[in-house]
Each structure stands twice: as C-alpha cells, then as structure tokens.
Amino acid sequence: MYRVFAYRGFEIHARVAVAFEGKYNVFFQIRGGGNVRVMGNIGAPTQLHSGPFALAEAYLVAEGAGQAAVDAVIGPNA
C-alpha cells in the first residue's frame, strides 16, 4: 500500500508492507523539491524502525519522519 504526502515543495512517499496480520512495516522516500541534489541519501527509501505499526499509525509515522528529514536538510526557515 502506498500514499504520497506533500510537504514544503517535496513529496513524501510512504509504502507499507504487511509484517503480520494487522501490523505493517513502513518505508518512506523523499522526492521532488526545487533542489533535488541537496537530498542526497535521504532520497533513497528508508525503513522506519520501532515497528511494526497499525496501518494508520504507519502512515502517520512515515509522514512525520519525512517532514523531519526535509526540515533537517533544508532548514526550518528555507
């Protein structure tokens, strides 16, 4: 399953995979933005740990992690 979230000119792509019944592992990937080369390795899919998660929680955690990654790279006031 897959969702895309828009954040500060970037796209946060979240993909979940079934770990076991009702629980999911989640991956996120950052794409787009005006300066793609600045994204470097965070442009690669990244698995989030501390899971598996319930489905809604998996998407929420992926969105938050993606937002934090964008903020860390381009800064809070960019």
Image (spheres, helix red, strand yellow):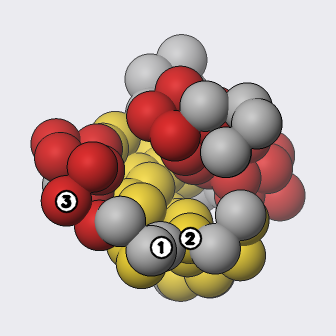
Circle 3 crowding by C-alpha within 10 Å: few under 14, some 14–19, many from 20: few
Q: Which residue is mark 3?
A: 37
Q: Nearer the viewer, residue 70 or 12?
A: 70
* Residue at image point 35% right, 65% down: 35
Secondary structure at badge 3 equals: helix
Circle 2 crowding by C-alpha within 10 Å: few under 14, some 14–19, many from 20: some
As measured in the structure, the alpha-carbon distance from the residue carrying label 2 to the one carrying label 3 is 13 Å
Question: Circles 1 and 2: CB distance less than 8 Å?
Answer: yes
Q: Which residue is mark 2?
A: 10
Q: Is residue 52 left or right of residue 22?
A: left
Q: Earlier in the sequence, mark 2 or mark 3?
A: 2
As measured in the structure, the alpha-carbon distance from the residue carrying label 1 to the one carrying label 3 is 9 Å
Q: Earlier in the sequence, mark 1 or mark 2?
A: 2
Q: Is residue 55 visible?
A: no
Q: Compared with residue 74, is residue 19 higher up or lower down, i.e. above or below? A: below
The amino acid pointed to by label 1 is Gly
Q: How far across and how far down the image is residue 27, in percent?
A: 41, 53
> Residue 33: which disc?
1
Question: Circles 2 and 3: CB distance less than 8 Å?
Answer: no
Secondary structure at badge 1 equals: loop
Q: Is residue 63 visible?
A: yes
Foreground disc of the pair 2, 3: 3
